[in-house]
Image (cartoon, coloured by chain):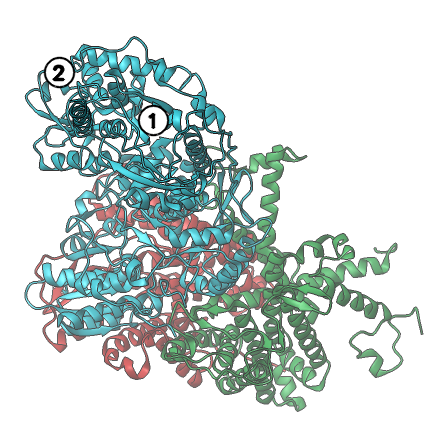
Amino acid sequence: MRGRPNLYTSYEAESQLMPTRTKKVVLGLFLVVAVLMPFDLPIIDQLPVVRFLGDNVWLRLVNRALCFMIAALGLNILSGLAGQISLGHTFFGGVGAYTAVLMGGKASSNLWGWGLPMWLWLPAAGVVAAAVGIAVAPAAVRVRGLYLGIVTLGLVFIGLHLSRVFPEIAGPGALGRKWPRMELRLWKEDEPFLDFSRDGHWLWFDINKNQKTYLFLLVVVIVMAWMAANLARSRTGRALQAIRDRDVAAEIMGVPEYRYKTTAFAISSFYAGIGGALFASLSVQLPPEQWSLIGAVTFIAALLIGGMGRVSGVLMGSFFVVTSHRFVEEIVDWMKHQAEEGGVFSGFFDFLISTGQGDGGFVSVMETALGYPLPVSALDEIIYGLLIIFFLLFEPLGLYGIWIKIRNYWKGWPFSY
Amino acid sequence: MSGLPLVLAANALDTFVQTLFKALALGSLYALLALGFVLIYKATQTINFAQGALALAGTWFLSIIFMDWEIPGRWIGGPGWVHWFIALLLAATATAVLGLIVERLTIRPMIGEPLFSMAVITLGLEVVIRVVAFDAVNTTPRILGIPWGAETFKIGGAMVAWSYIAAIGMAGVAFLGTWRFFKTRTGVAMRATAFDQEAALAQGINVGRVFAIAWAAGAALAAISGIFASMPPWGPAGLASRDGAFFAFRALPAVILGGLDSVVGALIGGLIIGFAEVFAGQYLASYTGVIGTGYQQVVPYVVMLVGLLVRPYGIFGTAEVRRV
Amino acid sequence: MKRLTRVLALLLTLTMIAAACGSDDDGDVAPATTAAPATTAAPATTAAPATTAAPTTEAPVESLSELNVAYFLEWPTANQVAQVEQTYDDALGMTVNWLPFGSGGDMALAMEAGDIDIAYSQGLTPFANFVTSGSELEIVGVAVSYADADNCVAHPDYGVTADNAAETLAGQKVYAPVGNVTHYKLLKMLGHLGVALDSFEHVPSDGGAAAVAAFESGDVAMACAFGGGVLSMLAAGGNLVMTGSEQEAIGIRVFDIISIPTQFGIDHPDVVETFLQVTEDANAAYASHRGPLEDTIAEAAGMTVEGSNALLDMFSFPDRATQLSDAWLGGTVQDVMKQQMDFFVEQGEIPKALDSYDAFVNTTFLEAIDDVEVVVVPTAYDYGVTDDTIRIGAIADLTGIFAPLVIQIIDAQTSYWNMVNDHGGIDGKQVDFVVMDNAYDVPTHLERYEAMKDKDSGVVFLSQSTGSPHTAAIAEDLVADGLGAIPLSWYSGWPDPSFGKNVFESYTNYCYESMNGVDWLASNVVEGDAKLAVISYPGEYGQDGATGAKMAAEALGIEVVYDGEGAAIPGADQTPVIAGLIESGANLVWATVGPSVFAEIFGGAAAQGFLPIWSGNSPTYNYMLLATPLAPALDAVYYQSSYVLAWNTSDAPGMKHMVAELQDRIPDKPLSDVYAVGWTEAMATHQILETAAKNKDMTRAGVIAAANETVVDYQGLAPNQGYGGDINDFIVRESYIFDIQADLFDVEATVAGGGSTGSVLLAGGPIMSDLARDHVYESACFSAG
């Protein structure tokens, strides 16, 4: 019946991804906005945040966030659904990326590369990463909790070591090699029929490479997010959640623990592989040191800030983690302009900000400031760390939890008490 | 330096003795770091990813206290190395206070939340403390004023650096102190809290105070191990260096191998990993063609993995009792 | 009888004519005492001159088929473009012969003899001398005004300066021309300085080249010349006793004129007017856009482009309106002539001067020609440049692993740009230096690049791009967007255009640096046969340096006892490397790593008693290690190699200038060897942009073109660097080697004190091994694939 959102008359209706009409409409609108965002359209210009996200500079960042989202979705399946702590997610991303470059890259005197088209290397990246996940699983499933976390951390170092043993695949240390571009070709011809990595012309308008890449990645993210959401409500998903909640009980009920944990590793590695390959292709050239501890930690942070276990939470958390530095920079920049141009709060900001030697303040806008006052770049990092802490202190469910609270408030409004 | 020209180790026995001392020293450093991790884990059930940043902060405190403010040299006389040790204690205390603040503000409110969340809070802390410490440890060299510098002494034909002896000694003191501490009332209280928080609370133990002590001790140990890992002939060569923030992560395999909640495990695990790394580095150096260069970075993790396959909770760790 | 008389009269006339024509001897004092009437050359052939100026005068004179113009060699003037391109010939409809002369006096004599019709850029003084003694010549225009380009240069060995001239010149020889403005200046200057004119021996000069030769022989204490001669003498170490501006301040005005025999002006006024018109056009073209004309002028003057430009910078070519003004032909020129002649009378050089020289200035021709408006070509620009600002970008690692060093490099660059702005900026525009952080992360670098290349808010050039993989990632985009960048990386692949076409590297590369270092140390420091150990990071930095070291070992026949290429892993324990080193028993180690890994390996090996000679590529060493207990060992065995001078290690003008400026601007910052890196990056960018400004093209493409033609002069901070032409010609092959002296280094020192980072330059300057010198560069030493 309409108007009674929590009334479900069939099992299928309840387990639908978008059970209510509102959800469907909102999702639709959101998709429309997302597709139109990079283009300079009058409607888009009215929307506050979206408007500048479509800028060329921000778009690159958004593209990076999209690749991150793909890998984070994988980690969500492993950690959020199956409850296995993994700090080695970047390792699987690296595996995917190096598979991609081996299959799709250009060969030369010191490097291996087979020059295959993207429709081969992209899925292969995922599949090979999944295979490695399955290979690692036997050791990983026997260990639990933080022990597992550190074991997976060891994978990162093993991966780094392997990249040095195989510079033919990874390129020389600290320099790396060039990744194949995001373009669709049939086989090995020179001109791709659809190229996402160069500026071009579609239908009746000009489109630059960042916009093209954005649309491509958006499609990939939507597909993979949909797959992940579906996984959660499928039989496998329920098994994984059972293992997360009480694995002994699950085993007793007939959920084979080791088999499903291996499945979880495989699927999450598949996602990581795809995400890693796309990220590497986006970044054009990466050194082997890129796949490091810091990245692993960032994934965990993204998951926790966004809200573990929920696809929308993962997406929000990834977006936040990747773009927060730049937001903080913009805010400090804005504060600096306010202080200079005598905006409403200029006195206050002037007090906070120091523009150089001799000007007092807590934060300096000189990039090369050292010591006290803090340089802007340090402030970005500090705020980022503080945000992680605050989120977890005050909202352990993360951004998703905040969203739920807001939604519930408005759901019951004006009776929100 | 004990003077030029120097004589190289003449034979295999001397090389072995040199390697032995280096392994003991590295193992001691790892053991100190592992002890810090273990104490914090025992009390608050979380792994503290900010140990490295606290270690860096400790080196910075020492440099400020000993070199810039010249404490306690400006007040009391006596040989320089006594001053240095006093300054070391002061720096450790300062870092302990930092640990206390951190614990009070961020860890205490999180009791009861899933342990993974707490671990990530420490990640956030790591970023904050590291960035501030990086900013403080800026481009001017921050000298730590190590009393024995890079000097060595001879045992037979082998040359051993005083820094190694100092690290071994420090680890010994720390472990003895911890063992003694666990026999005191507060120590017993901590063990009880580690075992079962609720029961300890019921017994009237001030669990909050236990947490505070654990974090303070963990931070102090981090500072001490950071300072001792900065001496020559280790990399930073007597300066507070940004690399110090990442040294602590090298000790994680030792923590896991020994068992996250076992003090004895921290010692044994640290020593095993240290020995493995140094001896593999020394004696497998000629096989880099086969195993690849940089293998010494993965040796700790390989040893850890092997250990975990045998005993999934670490050698001395308590197996988790899983209930239906 | 009547017949005989006629023959005799004819013979006598002919003899007199011959005597008059043949009486030119050069370099003599004072004009000829016989007042020989100036006759015009009288070629018989007729050719209708195509004139554009006023109609011919009454006298029916034959039209000219040739025009003879006198000019000076090694004297670049704007109209030489028209000379070379034969614009004069086309405008006049006749062949123009340009005949070089050594002095203005010779020009005057030739005019009297009828060999020369127009003298361009004749000195005022010889003209005045000749007309005083009766020559019928007249001034029709002012050619060039110059103060600094005609001067006296003192020889360094004699130590003559303005203060001590009176004593130091006594009894010495002074080499100077006679009877021209140089002579006049010399006498006036010495009079002002209180030098008695009989206290020295005045050796008459034959002109520029002779003066330079006399100077270089060392026989003369001072030599006076004009044009290129002055520059050559200054370059050879001489000093100006008084600068041009100082001389102008005491009333010495220096300029050259355009003169003609008076009769010629009567006979062929249209020719004179056309000549002046073409000259005026050429001057206007020069004034509006000098850049493209420089090569032509230099070639016509028979000088190098640099020499010609140096003189042109000191010249100005007044336009018609200025020439006709009171400051010039409206009265001042006549007054100056009178003053000079009176002065010479006082000195006893000539018997008497005329009462007035007004008769010898004829402005009718100039008045008849048209004014040519000088259209100043504006500088073209597209992105990154506006009317008032130039935006230069740097994507630097401000928070990542190289942050401490890069921050210092950026500080030095920022100081340089502040200095440039204080001195008026570039092409009148202020420099806006935009620094963005890439945290040593490639994706972040790409995002920052996106901002830098933006058409609205982007930059015109990147004066720094930190990191090899980062720069490699944007290398293709740089070409697509037409932007150039200077990398903060010295990988030997950057000069290769297929690797980095719009990447403009600085100094030499790791590979050549290793070659030079190993070669020099093995030959000069190591006792006996060298046994080399090579250790390096894996990757393009480490392995590039290691490859260079191994190439040197092979070329010199040195045994490589330990090959640790790629064996030193940052962040890992270095025991394997130390073990390998000690076992090898090397006596020379070349390390291509970073400071903390180096400290661990060096310290760890030293702790086990291993102390051979150590050195390594520039990034391996950091002077801060002298604050550690390793300092004595470093002092004893470490030699620092670098591609740019370490802090305060030389008196080169570039180093002194940098130290002085940094002391002004960042006095409280600590000492560092890397300030020079940032400073030279900015110098290179500055010179490239100046070239672009001179070419009036500051579009991005124009800046790239300018970069490819600029040869950057680092003024001794590093070897000069070019980017155009054959790689093997412009690639830099020299590096520097330093000894470490720990007691020179003070931990507390700041920039304000100058001081030292403990490095002492060896070998007196840059070193270059035979291997590096002869190496034919085809691609990077270490191929990255």
Three-letter code for the amino acid on which mark 1 is drawn: Ser
Chain in red, by letter, is B
Neighbour tally class for label 2: few under 14, some 14-19, many 20 plus, Cα within 10 Å: some
Q: Quadrant of residue C204?
A: top left
Asked whether the residues under marks 1 and 2 belong to the same chain, the reply is: yes
Q: Quadrant of residue A164?
A: bottom left
| Drawing shade for chain C | cyan
Chain in green, by letter, is A
Q: Chain of mark 2?
A: C
The quadrant in which the N terminus of chain C is found is top left
Location of mark 2 (residue): C197
- Residue C390 falls left or right of residue C583: right
- Residue C489 falls left or right of residue C29: right
Position in image of residue B87 (x %, y %) = 31, 47
Q: CA distance from mark 1 to mark 2?
A: 31 Å
In this view, the residue farthest toward the top is C355
Question: Between residues C49 and C324, which one lies in front from this camera angle?
Answer: C49
Q: Measured along the vertical axis of the image, is residue C400 above or below residue A122?
A: above
Residue B199 in view, yes or no? no
- Residue B212 falls left or right of residue C112: right
In this view, the residue farthest toward the right is A1
Mark positioned earlier in the residue sequence (1 or 2): 2
Three-letter code for the amino acid on which mark 2 is drawn: Leu
The quadrant in which the C terminus of chain C is found is bottom left
Position in image of residue C411 (x %, y %) = 40, 44
SS state under label 1:
strand
Residue A286 in view, yes or no? yes
Position in image of residue A63 (x %, y %) = 61, 65
Q: Which mark is residue B1?
A: none
